[in-house]
Structures are given as structure tokens and as C-alpha cells.
Amino acid sequence: MPDLITHVSMAHLILRGIDSLQRRLSFFQSDAIWLYYLGTILQDLLTRPVNILFPSAIHWTIFLHTPLAMTVVHLMLVMLFEGSKRQTAFLYLTSGSAIHFLVDALQKQVIGNNFWLYPLSWHNFSLKLFWAHEFMAVLPYLVSMIIVLETVLLWRPKMKNKIALTTKSRH
Amino acid sequence: MKQNARIFMYRRSVWTIGAVILILLMIKSRFFHPWLDIETCRQNPDKYDGALITHFREPRIGSIERDGFWLLQKTCADIFVRTDTSGLRRNEFIGLLATFNRDSTLTVDRLVIARHRRYKMTLSLIPAILILVMLLRKLRWNHASRMLTWRSDA
């Protein structure tokens, strides 16, 4: 699987894309956005540390890296929230999680870990485009792109205000 | 008060049902998975001669010899893997598909070096810590309702 920075970066760029298309208030104004990012890494957070420390436990944990198990985990997690927040929390967590599975599916693997239909099937869904280490080569560009994009978005309203003020003072 | 009790009962029910589903999924993945383990093959080498092994425990390349290398795994005895050793380096993590032989060795079907794996693990800590810290900052525990909430909404 790709590293978590790649997962979070891809998820961030996708959400920025959707955010720029819609005319409603930005997703990024809600504190719940961090649940979206949590959704993009949660399956790895729950499985990878255990598998690295106790490799023989992989068959005990592999089910957590599946859409059904993660949906159940999300449902259990959102029960911690106030009733009015649960739906939003679930949507953020689930959409983050869906992006995680999609990014994982881009990867070539010797053995799979994209068992989208588990427990019905152990079929591994993979587009076999990149090896995991190839994501590492793309990582600096991905992070630079986000830094540039976020800087532009941060400065754009300030620039707009400045231009408006200058035009006003000229009149 | 009555409404709170109902909410907590609902929450407990979801957690109980969720836990049961997760336990069932875990049992299926542990006992009904399609992969063979080296230890299983080693216990009965004649039976598993020619079997394809797909799952290894954090496999690394150990000492390299002319016709293969020793495969190091966590919590598992080393095993000799027959393959062309050109381009292989000691101590590298690998992805491996191999056939089990009666003499308790393996023959490589497919081998991929998991380059930068250690960097990948280290770098992955950054977003994990950042997201957890941000969640701790942004989410609030409402003591009255005994539930989590956040402040601003889009």
C-alpha cells in the first residue's frame, strides 16, 4: 500500500477539486474535515502497526482492510458523536475511506490487499499501475503541488481585497 | 433523562452488533483464508510439495548464496529460497510468491524488492500524528451529553 502521506495528499487534492466545483460553503470550513482525513488512514492505522509488530497476526487483522469492516467501524465510531453530527461524521469518514481503497487499487501487488467484496470473495481489485515504492518517487511533487495550491488559495482573498481597496481609492 | 437513556441504549446496541459483526469477519479471515503459511507446509512437507505460498511475515533477504538466499522472517525460522540472486541486497524487504519444495526450501515464482519501505513507514508517522493531534484539538467532549462534538460547520 502507498504511504500515508500519499493517501492523505490524494484525498486532499480530490476534496479540493470537489470543493472548487460546488457553490456551497467550503468543506474546509468545518472541523469535521479531520474526520475525512482520519477516514483516509484509519484502515492502515488499525492494521499496519499490529502487522509490523506481530507479523503472524496478519490473518487476524486483514479483514479490517475491507470496505465492510471499515463501514462497521465507522458506524461504531460515529456513535461517540452527538446525534446531529453523526450523519456528517459518517459521510466524512466513509468518503475518506473510499478514497483510501481507490488509491490502494492503483497499486501493483505481489499479493493483494484490496478485498472489496470480503467476506463474499477474496478477489483482489487492482488496476496494477504502480508499485508501492513508485508512489515514493511521486511524493515530493504531490506535496509541492499541495503547498503551492494552498498558498495560492490562502493569498487569493487577500489579493482580491487589496485590488478592491486600490481600485476604490483611485475612484 | 429518559431521552438520554434511550440514546445510550441505541449506542450500546450499535456497538454490540458492530462488535459481533467484526468478530465474525475476523474469524472468517483467520480460519477461512485461502493462503498457505510456511509453518503449515513445514509441518507436512510431502503434502505441500509444490504448493504456492503467498503470505510471509515481514520477509527480508538474509545471507545471499550462489543459487539463492536465506529468507528472514519475524517469529519464523529462516528458509532457503532458490533464485537468481543478481541485484539482490542483504537486509532488503521483499514481496514474494514462492513454491514450497519437499526439502523445505522455496523456489521463487515472483520476487519484488520493497524499496524505501523503511522510509515509507517513518514518513507515514507524520500524517498519522498530525491528524490525531488535529482531531484532539478540533473535537470536544460534551460532558453534559457525554458525546463528542465539533465547533464549526460548513
Image (tube, coloured by chain):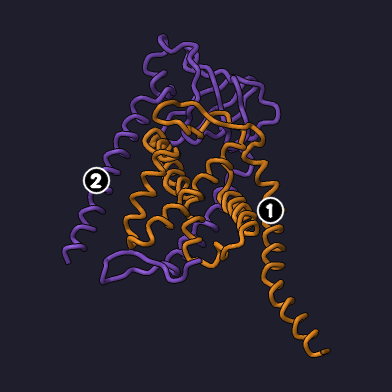
Does residue A88 lie above or below A63 as drawn? below
User: Dot 1: few (<14), some (14–19), or many (≥20) neighbours within 10 Å?
Assistant: some
> Does the rendering let one see residue B38?
no
> Does the rendering let one see residue A134?
yes
- Residue under label 2: B16
Where in the figure is residue A140, as x and y percent of width and height? 70, 54
Q: Which chain is orange?
A: A
Residue at image position (63%, 34%) is: B113
Where in the figure is residue A36, as x and y percent of width and height? 50, 55
Amino acid identity at mark 1: Leu
- What secondary structure is marked by label 2? helix
Query: Front-most of B98 and A9?
Result: A9
Residue at image position (80%, 84%) is: A167
Residue at image position (46%, 44%) is: A48
Where in the figure is residue B73, as x and y percent of width and height? 48, 33
User: Dot 2: few (<14), some (14–19), or many (≥20) neighbours within 10 Å?
Assistant: few
Q: Quadrant of residue A57?
A: top left
Q: Which chain is purple?
A: B
Label 1 – label 2 distance at C-alpha? 41 Å
Amino acid identity at mark 2: Thr
Q: Quadrant of residue B97?
A: top right
- Residue under label 1: A142
